[in-house]
């Protein structure tokens, strides 16, 4: 489970615009979502799954920009209503 961003990270997040890097199409009865990347002035790189770039209803987390994968291989997987979307 990703850790909660600290106050310093939240302040850095508020000051930087997010960039949409992928779109997840809407399933019947559900809203579309996107995958967003956000570098911060505090030196973090954040990856979010959210309905929009400005939504606070987002899931994801931040890692130091010099090691954005926290020393691990990259595997990103999102699942919605039984459907899986992987990058």
Image (cartoon, rainbow, N blue to C red):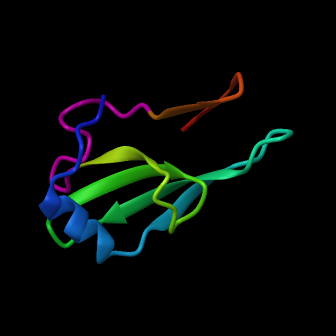
In the rendered image, residue 35, in percent from the top left (x then y), is placed at 53, 52
For image coordinates 49% across by 52% down, the residue present is 57
Front residue of 4 and 84: 4
Image-based side of 19 in relation to 4, left or right: right
Task: Check the picture and name the quadrant holding the C terminus.
Answer: top right
- Count of marks overlaid on the render: 0
| Secondary structure that dominates the magenta span | loop
Q: Is residue 77 above or below residue 53?
A: above
Image-based side of 76 in relation to 8, left or right: right
Q: Is residue 70 above or below residue 10?
A: above
Front residue of 20 and 49: 49
Residue found at the very far right of the displayed protein: 28
Task: Check the picture and name the quadrant holding the N terminus.
Answer: top left
Q: State the image quarter where residue 82 is shown.
A: top right
Image-based side of 51 in relation to 77, left or right: right
For image coordinates 29% across by 67% down, the residue present is 13
Q: Is residue 15 above or below residue 69?
A: below
Q: Which residues are magenta?
A: 63-75
In the rendered image, residue 67, in percent from the top left (x then y), is placed at 17, 47
- Residue 53 sits inside the magenta stretch: no
In the rendered image, residue 53, in percent from the top left (x then y), is placed at 52, 66
In the rendered image, residue 16, in percent from the top left (x then y), is placed at 33, 75
For image coordinates 41% across by 59% down, the residue present is 37
Residue found at the very far top of the displayed protein: 82
For image coordinates 43% across by 68% down, the residue present is 18
């Amino acid at each position: 489970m990703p850790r909660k961003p600290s106050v310093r990270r939240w302040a850095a997040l508020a000051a930087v615009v997010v960039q949409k890097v992928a779109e997840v199409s809407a399933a019947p009865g559900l809203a579309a979502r996107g995958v967003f990347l956000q570098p911060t002035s505090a030196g973090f790189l954040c990856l979010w799954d959210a309905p929009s770039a400005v939504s606070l209803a987002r899931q994801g987390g931040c890692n130091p920009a010099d090691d954005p994968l926290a020393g691990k291989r990259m595997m990103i997987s999102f699942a919605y209503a039984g459907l899986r979307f992987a990058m």
